[in-house]
Amino acid sequence: MDFKQVIAANNFLFEKIIETPLLDLSSSKVLPLFPSQTRVKMKLEFLQHVGSFKARGVLLGLSRLTVEQKKAGVIAFSAGNHALAVSWAAQFLGISAKVIMPKTADKFRVEGCKTYAAEILLAEDAEEGFSLMYDLSEKEKRQVMHPFEADHMIIGAATCGLEMISSMPDMDVAIIPIGGGGLISGISSAIKLVKPSVTVFGVEPYGADSMFQSFLKKKPMVIDKVKTIADSLGAPMALPKSFELARRNVDEIVRLTDNEMVESMNIIREKLNFLVEPACGSSLAACLGPLKEKVLGKNVALIACGSNISFDRYKEIVS
Amino acid sequence: MDFKQVIAANNFLFEKIIETPLLDLSSSKVLPLFPSQTRVKMKLEFLQHVGSFKARGVLLGLSRLTVEQKKAGVIAFSAGNHALAVSWAAQFLGISAKVIMPKTADKFRVEGCKTYAAEILLAEDAEEGFSLMYDLSEKEKRQVMHPFEADHMIIGAATCGLEMISSMPDMDVAIIPIGGGGLISGISSAIKLVKPSVTVFGVEPYGADSMFQSFLKKKPMVIDKVKTIADSLGAPMALPKSFELARRNVDEIVRLTDNEMVESMNIIREKLNFLVEPACGSSLAACLGPLKEKVLGKNVALIACGSNISFDRYKEIVS
């Protein structure tokens, strides 16, 4: 990825995508969380279309389809923010979309998808979902939209990184969550293209640490099982494209317990009045937990990367 | 109030007060709430110090005390956001403060006050609270800080209005909640000083409509009883200073039921991921409810004026 590609994507997305606020965490309620001399800002990307950064990459990807591909439509399998982004972007561009979600998906997200024009299919589980996706893709010639391992997803995320470093040129440290790796590979690349001296930390749940394991083994790894409350970070594997970019641009990966993420959700609610899903609070959780010493005296960028969670599920988690 | 006073206050508050974001309500989640051609922005003043606009006026007021008065300290009676603002601003300026809160106050707010250096006293009820306040004020020569009927409170609120109109020069309509009237008299004055053509609507709960009644009678009125879930809007009376300014600058007052405010709290949580108290959601509630026809095709400014509510209380209200 080079700077020209990021700028081109940024130009294309201008006024189609929301330039979300970068909030200075300096109010009297939240400032005492951090050591003095440490200045922290949080990108409120949950205020993006469909409530997550995924909107950027998916819109970019759909817009780059050929006329033929656009006519045939797209298909995706996802339980969460990707499903919402595909539903929304397809409607935005007038492309037919089928979105397969597991029956266990948060109802809030299923309902969310239904507000757009996409056709929602429910699958028993991931196995059935993926198989249905490949079947329909072949039968109907629909393009499969991958949730992270695609140039457009990475470059879409890079536009978010570009906004962050442009509004915060004195950034020393960025702390970015890792699901599949699309977000961090894009953001870290954009930030380092503009300011190579920024230290980028990645954050993964202990129960879904595929990128951490891949860093250890120096190749993309699959983990045995995923067990975390942060469903949006629950990718069971790293894949080559995003792994390579992350390897190059991410300085270190730290891991979080579920408890650390719940604690962060509570802090975000009490101090900022934001109700966010676990993945969305992970960046702050890492800043207050495993990275506490490493952010001392630094200008730190966090990202609240996205949130779509039903109130019932939220109450279950934080209670 | 003239423009010079607002500018002077704005200059004084610069970098002491947070210039809170004015959020464009244009994400795919929230946009469908409004008729097409209507553009709505929301001032996120709950991200202010101590979580409400009160921080502005109180800081201004305390800074204007004489050296003698600062030495003697201040006192206030409040169940809510004013108590927090006095506690915070007194600590900020190194002034001794006693803050009296009713025993029934939300624990979240009492705990919040305790994080600052103020001395918190609990009273059985408002009667005991006010009597204690006047006693201690006389005995200890402490300046009483009024929650709204004071030039500094009004001019503090005006700085918030100045930020709003400066970031949204195409504003046609502003919708502002009314408790005692300090917020709306300040904001409406500032907005009309800059752009007289803006229509300013005030919003009150049916159960605390002292300003509405005062507008009807053309003089500041006391109402018999206050009954609303929006405790922060629960002032039982209008007072001359804020009434006069409001009379001059507020075009119309509309009223809300508790249900309309709860519905707005739910929308704000589902579409924006903000967890706010009833008063904070009232501006949007009016926009979607009684003012629905009047905002058609307009550029509308709302304010989420402040929020400090315990999660327990929140769940009670919205369930």
Image: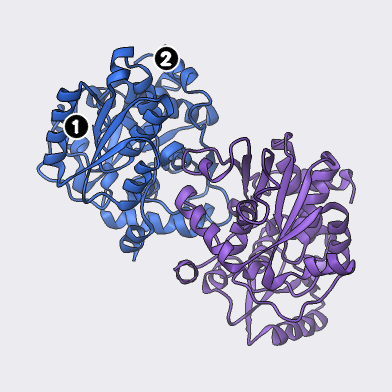
Chain colours: A purple, B blue
Q: SS of the residue at dot 2?
A: helix
Res. B233 image quadrant: top left
Q: SS of the residue at dot 1?
A: loop
Q: Which residue occupies 29% across, 43% down? A: B232
Residue nearer the viewer, B317 or A60: B317
Q: Which residue occupies 28% across, 17% down? A: B69
Quarter of the image containing the N terminus of chain B? top left
Circle 1: residue type: Ala
Which residue is under mark 2? B3
Residue nearer the viewer, B239 or B75: B75
Q: Which residue occupies 75% across, 67% down? A: A147
- Crowding around mark 1 (Cα neighbors within 10 Å: few <14, some 14 to 19, many 20+) is many
Q: Which chain carries label 2?
A: B
Position of A295 with respect to A27 (left or right) is right
Q: Position of residue B311 (x, y in %)?
A: 38, 58
Res. B84 image quadrant: top left
Q: Where is residue A154 in the image (x, y as percent from the top left)?
A: 80, 57
Position of B200 with respect to A56 (left or right) is left
Which residue is under mark 1? B238
Same subunit: marks 1 and 2:
yes
- Residue B250 visible somewhere in the drawing: no
Q: Mark 1 lies on which chain?
A: B
Above or below: residue A163 compared with residue A154: above
On residue A147, which mark appears? none
- Residue A99 visible somewhere in the drawing: yes
Do the numbered discs 1 and 2 sit on residues whose CB atoms are within 8 Å? no
Above or below: residue A286 compared with residue A7: below
Q: Which residue lies furthest to the left in this view?
A: B224
Circle 2: residue type: Phe
Q: Position of residue B132 (x, y in %)?
A: 14, 35
Above or below: residue A179 compared with residue A34: below
**Mark 2 or mark 1, which is nearer the start of the sequence?**
2
